[in-house]
Image (cartoon, rainbow, N blue to C red):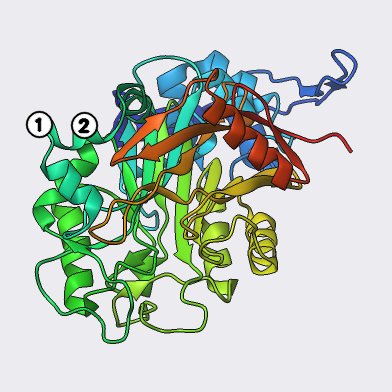
Amino acid sequence: MKKCNFCVAGVCIIISLLAGCGRITTEVDTVNLEANEPQKIEIVDLTDAWDTILNNSTLEFIGGHPIDESFLAMVTSTYGDDIIEEIASYANFETPEIWYQLTGKSIHVLWYEYCEMTGVQSYAYDKTYIINKDTAGDIVIDFTGDVSFADGIATTDYMDHQINGIYDCFSEPLLEEMRSADILMINNEFAYTERGTPLAGKAYTFRGNPSRAHLLKEIGADVVSVANNHVFDYDEVGFLDTINTLSDEEIPYVGAGVNLDEARKPVYFIVAGRKIAIVAATQIERTLSFTREATGVLPGVMKCLHPEAFCNTIREAKANADYVLVVPHWGTEGTAHYGADQIGLARAFVEAGADAVIGGHTHCLQTVEYMDDVPIFYSLGNYWFSTSGNMPADYDTGIAQIRIKSDGSIDSYFIPCKFSGGVTSKLHTGDIAYSNIIDGLNDLSSTANIDKAGYISKKNK
């Protein structure tokens, strides 16, 4: 990301000059420009603009951040007097979108850049990643279900016997889709380790050689969820090997950590002037305790069977980002019907501030619903995954896609895919299999409709 040429000393000079001018009393007239148009405040000059923003802005307008003169000096220095005066003319309104419209950056992104520039110690800079977007248009965020590079399973064996390795395990159109997304998130459903022993009494345990972690970048992954019921399959040593391997490969992960503080932290991405938070937690196991929950001193995963703590994470993310995307590992394996437990958790997530919920764990597709105006992908199922040395039967799968438009609104899509014989392929709109997946999901949904292009909308009541 291009940084503005600005220094803290410059802030002080600007503040001193403006302070010497004295306060200008402004008569505020509110004029209705057009029907349904917001009213604006008349701004006299730059000093008046600063005074108006500092004294009249709602918390919503400034994103809840403690902005001050030095922050406004940064914005003024970077974008000019006219821009800050125009922003100030809206400063008695709750919507912060005007910051993005006039600077190309949301208030959360501007505040992040200011804190990074000035070294404000109270701001959390870690787990924030800047994505350089190559083209204009929508911000595209793709999510997949379960992926495994574990040893001794059919898909990994298939990959190892292909001339082009992992590249032969996905169709070319699907690889293009995954790599072209601004953010691609997958569920990493195994441990990266050669150490430890499988947890006693657990039916399925998965681990893969840490050297395979580079494959994530090969398929375009930008972040992985480790909030699942297999990351702890080889006990604490295998778990720590996993998060250390991902760190060494510089692959962001979310939903687990060396303690609860790390496990609950959102991952933030700054893309095209917007700040996007991703949070993850697992409801599984619901009645067993193979997978350790992180504590104040013990490593483990973030859990959400009882969602209060995770909802606090969602609220924290909402206070620091423009969008919050919630990734729960939940539900009952092997059923295409989501349960009352998932509905209850989804309601808690939405009320805490989720803008979309993208679930997994069931190893099969579950449908999409709307809760209020929030899309809930109940489960993406398997994406490229097997549980034994026997190749799985063909299964339906797909990509959940969230698109953030230039006006700040969110569109959601589902991209149907098919796994067959070790290869996951993107289906074409004319394929019978494509239509069958769309029709099946629509039949199971009471509130959402997926059209033939994959676009998801609310059903008319």
Task: Give the amino acid at mark 1.
Answer: Ile
Task: Give the amino acid at mark 2.
Answer: Asp
How crowded pointer 2 is (Cα within 10 Å; few <14, some 14-19, many 20+) is rated as some
Residue beneath label 1, please? 163
Residue in the picture at 44% in, 41% down: 143
Percent across and percent down for residue 264 are 42, 65
Q: CA distance from mark 2 to mark 1?
A: 8 Å
Residue in the picture at 16% in, 59% down: 151
Residue in the picture at 75% in, 19% down: 42
Q: Which mark is residue 294?
A: none
**Above-or-below relation of 245 to 22:** below
Q: Work out which quarter of the rendered image holds the N terminus and state it.
A: top left
232 horizontally vs 304: left or right: left
296 horizontally vs 43: left or right: left
Percent across and percent down for residue 297 are 30, 83
Determine the residue located farthest toward the bottom in the rendered image: 200
Q: Circles 2 and 1: CB distance less than 8 Å?
A: yes
Percent across and percent down for residue 144 are 42, 43
Mark yes or no: residue 324 visible. yes
**Above-or-below relation of 41 to 259:** above
Which badge, 2 or 1, comes first in the chain's sequence?
Answer: 1
Percent across and percent down for residue 31 are 86, 18
Mark 2, secondary structure of its residue = helix
Residue beneath label 2, please? 168
Residue in the picture at 72% in, 42% down: 443
Mark yes or no: residue 46 visible. no
